Amino acid sequence: MNIFMSRIFTLFFLVLIFYAFSLCRTGHAQAAEVSNKSANGLALSDMQIEITSKGHTATFRLYDTVAAKQLYKQLPLSLDLSNFRNAQWMFYPPEKLSVTKDEAYHDGKKGELSYYEPWGDAFMLYKDFYAGDEMHRLGVGLSGIDEIAHMSGKAIIKKMEPQKSMRQNSMQITVIANGHEIVFELNDSQASKDLYAQLPMRISVDNYGSNEKIFYPAKKLGTSNTPLVKSATVGTLAYYAPWGDVVMFYGSFGSASGLYELGKAIQGSEHIRKLSGTIKIEK
């Protein structure tokens, strides 16, 4: 009887240790979220990668950080995926990545590619998760974000060579306010070029309705060869010609007569709804 009880106690103790270990990662993230630390703005690089599993593909643009460069250098890789908390798919690069203090933070948003230093795993979020100081942002999703949830088993991670013409023609602007940065990639339209030519600017931003932040550039934008918005979603940047205002959408909208598309947020779209007062916009 004593031997039996001893084995039961040992089994219970091992289960308790395993459970505590599984909660460790979430605990770190929750503690960091409560700290109210704002994310540091990180510059995006030209490095792009493609991750494919079970016929599903997602692409990411990497940040210009030490860890992102180290991951990129190890590619191509064929690695097993592991699921965590039904929110992310993880894989373990053969060589651990170096995380610097200034770069060690992620927003915990769907579509992020990040690195968890204590475990040495890179992970793709297909649901919003937690923000954390030990979770290092590696990149932002470009396409196939909704495909991540359907991945499993083996994944092929490889480099993508950005088209030279795309790099040359790409226009990006950064909106800065309240300690946050939102990066928009503009299309090659006349309206986008007219807006870009007026930067940098400091300007007042207003809330409109329940899904828009708007501001009025000093000069109106030309709309020749500028596409109309077909379906505005979170992160869409647009120009409403009848009023002469630029619109940053933080909710779905659809389309409207005179609403022209300027581009799309590639970083920080979750911060649009928080914009207020005076914002800074720069190239």
Image (tube, grey):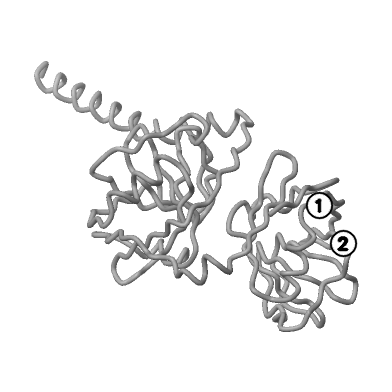
What percent of the width, then of the height, locates residue 29? 49, 34
Numbered circles on residues, count: 2
* Identity of the residue furthest to the top in this view: 2
4, 97: nearer the viewer: 97
Q: Amino acid at mark 1?
A: Met
Q: Residue at x 27, y 61 (%)?
A: 156
- Quarter of the image holding residue 240? bottom right
The residue indicated by pointer 2 is 216
- Quarter of the image holding residue 258? bottom right
Q: Residue at x 71, y 53 (%)?
A: 272
- Give the structural element (helix, strand or loop) at label 1: strand
Above or below for 52 versus 87:
below
What percent of the width, then of the height, locates residue 275? 77, 49
170, 279: nearer the viewer: 170
Tell whether 256 sits left or right of 48: right
Tell whether 222 sits left or right of 75: right
- Give the structural element (helix, strand or loop) at label 2: loop
Tell whether 142 sits left or right of 283: left
What percent of the width, then of the height, locates residue 165? 50, 72
Q: Residue at x 49, y 63 (%)?
A: 142
Above or below for 93 versus 218:
above
- In the rendered structure, find residue 201 and report the number of the disc placed on it: 1
On the rendered image, what quadrant is the C terminus found in? bottom right
Question: In this rendering, which labeled residue sits more in front, label 1 or label 2?
Answer: 1
Other-residue count near label 1 (Cα within 10 Å), few / some / many at <14 / 14–19 / ≥20: some
CA–CA distance between discs 1 and 2? 11 Å
Other-residue count near label 2 (Cα within 10 Å), few / some / many at <14 / 14–19 / ≥20: some
Q: Circles 1 and 2: CB distance less than 8 Å?
A: no
Q: Amino acid at mark 2?
A: Tyr
What percent of the width, then of the height, locates residue 169? 58, 69
Above or below for 52 versus 38:
below
Q: Residue at x 47, y 57 (%)?
A: 46
